[in-house]
């Protein structure tokens, strides 16, 4: 259904954004009113018999269609509010426009019956009445999801347009017999029964799986996405929390300090930045950056190896992780050794590259140019445990998440890809240890955050670069606040960066806030070209190189117990239910519409 225009400044980041790509965009009020005039004229042309006078034709346009439509468009909002619902004027206008548009095919069918069977004596007023059942069917369908998921609160609002059309047409085109008046009531009853059948059918999959009405979530979803309405967000959180399970998560921090102050902090929570919008852990990079505050310097929140099993469903659960990060930042210990290596790969075709920084091995994992997406948390745990058991350094793992192909690139535990990833990560760590030598570590940081999410697909944290000079080599880590990178884009960006540093890697945060720009994954590169990103990346890298400073490395890891997360299988269950709903929706739409058409024609023929 239609999305209302966003209010400037209603954004989770620093720039306003629009989520209307998730839904059909409601036309502006002047355009909508113009459409109402055009549609009213069109329906009247279909229904009016040849030879109808101009005055009668204008009365038909005005009183049977345009006036009821306008009164309904402007009256729906206050009436819905009085009954405990809410629908904004742009959506109300759009709903009335769509209702009139739906009446056109029914008017064509009714007019066809009238012309093919003139002996039935079907009157013009009867044709006006017969199309009001579909009007109720469609309006109630929309209002139940948009205004209030309550039959008693939505029905009076749904009846406004068809009842006004029946009453005004009856006044202008008398006389209306008792039989015709009764038929008008029957049409409305048929429309209501058919919409009840439709709503019940489409709501069944989600209600069966999650014991909640999916239709009841439509309004909160719209309000969360478009308005960041706290009440709507709370309802969505309640829906997800019903199925959430407690999990013990982990956060790791790597801090780079100069003169006793942090210049940069890498935050690595085992939290997936979803599910969508700003709900729960979505927009995690911004939330953790704000939680750590300016004392942490430039904060980097790359994607750690984990998937939707560890989406957090509420702000309260995100706060647990954020508070753990704050406590850990104050407790970080200096590295136990003064060693560093370049960023190295153990061999061609490796999924992993590693850089030793003190006693921490920073490992970046990517399958690019092959598809690269979520890596199961269990694989990361295995790498950390096995390296520790072998006496290796502390492991900080990053999923670069930098080569998007639809529905490909996930790495599950126990697969051949997972086994290669484990072997490559361990080999990369050994190579980094072998290449390490004593000496200072210098870092430089810079960020570019003036991106427009709807037009460029990059969220509020923008592009930020960490340049590390150690062991005679300069490495650049480019982090883009977006959900993956279109396949084939990593290589030209890396080549551009390696024109100013020795080795580079490009990563994304997997931030699911970018989904709401078009209702899908919205990978980086879909709206902003590789050449533009490469140009920006080089500029940011040069700025970081210009402020290279010797630093002391500090690190720490903290367990965060009993954090509620969506848990294994939740996303699959939800997507399956949504898929079932979509499948049912098409069938239910066609079935109830045909049922309404057939039953209405029977009444039209019986009571002409």
Image (tube, rainbow, N blue to C red):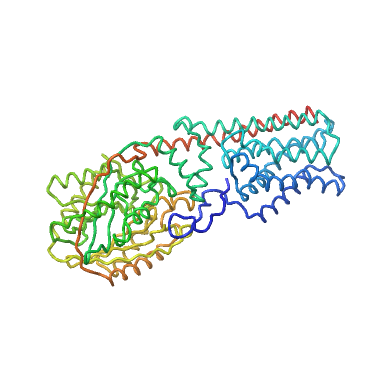
Whether residue 545 is visible to the viewer of this picture, yes or no, is: yes
Q: In this view, does 417 lie above or below 17?
A: above
Residue 597 in percent (x, y) is at 69, 33
Q: Which of 46 and 471 is in front in this view?
A: 471
Q: In this view, does 491 lie above or below 150?
A: below
Classify residue 559 by image quadrant. top left
Q: Nearer the viewer, residue 387 or 112?
A: 387
What residue appears at the point 21 percent right and 52 percent down from the top-left corner? 556
Q: In this view, does 432 lie above or below 471?
A: above
- Left or right of 129 in this view: 456: left
Q: Give the quadrant of the N terminus.
A: top right
- Left or right of 486 in this view: 191: right
Q: Which of 311 and 600 is in front in this view?
A: 311
Disc tally is: 0
Q: In this view, does 465 lie above or below 11?
A: below
Q: Nearer the viewer, residue 295 or 4?
A: 295
Residue 469 in percent (x, y) is at 22, 66
What residue appears at the point 18 percent right and 51 percent down from the top-left corner? 394
Residue 414 in percent (x, y) is at 26, 39
Q: Give the quadrant of the C terminus.
A: top right
């Amino acid at each position: 259904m239609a999305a209302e225009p966003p209010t400037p400044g209603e954004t989770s980041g620093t720039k306003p954004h629009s989520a209307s790509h998730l839904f059909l965009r409601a036309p502006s009020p002047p355009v909508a009113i113009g459409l109402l005039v055009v549609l009213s004229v069109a329906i009247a042309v279909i229904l009016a018999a040849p030879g109808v006078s101009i005055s009668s034709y204008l009365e038909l346009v005005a009183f049977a269609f345009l006036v009821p439509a306008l009164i309904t468009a402007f009256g729906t909002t206050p009436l819905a509010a009085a009954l405990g619902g809410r629908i904004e004027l742009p959506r109300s206008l759009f709903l009335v426009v769509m209702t009139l548009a739906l009446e056109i095919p029914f008017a064509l069918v009714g007019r066809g019956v009238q012309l093919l069977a003139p002996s039935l004596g079907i009157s013009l007023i009867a044709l006006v009445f017969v199309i009001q059942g579909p009007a109720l069917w469609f309006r109630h369908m929309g209002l139940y999801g948009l205004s209030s998921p309550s039959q008693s609160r939505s029905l009076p609002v749904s009846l406004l347009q068809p009842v006004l059309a029946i009453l005004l047409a009856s006044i202008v085109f008398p006389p209306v017999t008792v039989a015709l008046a009764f038929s008008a009531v029957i049409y409305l009853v048929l429309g209501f029964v058919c919409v009840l059948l439709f709503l019940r059918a489409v709501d069944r999959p989600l209600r069966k799986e999650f014991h909640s009405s999916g239709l009841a979530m439509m309004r909160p979803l719209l309000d969360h996405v478009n308005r960041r309405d706290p009440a709507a967000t709370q309802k969505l959180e309640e829906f997800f929390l019903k199925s959430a399970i407690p999990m013990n998560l982990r956060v790791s921090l790597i801090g780079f300090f100069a003169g006793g102050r942090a210049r940069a902090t890498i935050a690595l929570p085992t939290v997936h930045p979803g599910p969508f919008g700003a709900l729960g852990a979505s927009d995690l990079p911004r939330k953790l950056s704000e939680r750590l505050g300016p004392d942490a310097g430039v904060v980097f929140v790359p994607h750690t190896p984990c998937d939707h099993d560890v989406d957090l469903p509420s702000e309260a659960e995100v706060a647990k992780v954020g508070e753990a990060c704050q406590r850990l930042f104050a407790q970080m210990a200096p590295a136990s050794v003064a060693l560093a290596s370049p960023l190295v790969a153990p061999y061609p075709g490796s999924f992993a590259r590693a850089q030793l920084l003190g006693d921490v091995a920073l490992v970046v994992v990517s399958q690019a140019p092959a598809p690269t997406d979520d890596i199961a948390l269990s694989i990361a745990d295995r790498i950390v445990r096995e390296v520790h058991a072998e006496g290796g350094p502390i492991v900080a793992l990053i999923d670069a998440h930098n080569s998007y192909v639809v529905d490909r690139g996930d790495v599950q535990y126990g697969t051949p890809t997972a086994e290669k990833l484990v072997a490559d990560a361990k080999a990369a760590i050994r190579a980094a240890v072998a290449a390490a030598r004593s000496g200072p570590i210098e870092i430089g940081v810079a960020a570019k955050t003036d991106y427009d999410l709807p037009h460029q697909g990059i969220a509020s944290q923008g592009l930020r670069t960490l340049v590390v000079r150690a062991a005679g080599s300069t490495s650049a880590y480019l982090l883009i606040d977006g959900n993956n990178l279109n396949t084939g884009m990593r290589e030209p960006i890396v080549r551009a960066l390696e024109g100013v540093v020795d080795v580079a890697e490009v990563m994304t945060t997997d931030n699911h806030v970018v989904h709401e720009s078009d209702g899908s994954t919205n990978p980086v590169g879909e709206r902003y070209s590789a050449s533009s990103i490469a140009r920006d990346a080089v500029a940011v890298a040069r700025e970081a190189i210009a402020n290279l400073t010797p630093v002391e490395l500090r690190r720490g890891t903290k367990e965060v117990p009993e954090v509620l997360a969506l848990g294994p299988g939740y996303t699959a269950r939800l997507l399956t239910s949504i898929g079932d709903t979509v499948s049912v929706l098409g069938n239910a739409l066609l079935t109830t519409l045909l049922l309404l058409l057939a039953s209405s024609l029977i009444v039209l023929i019986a009571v002409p």
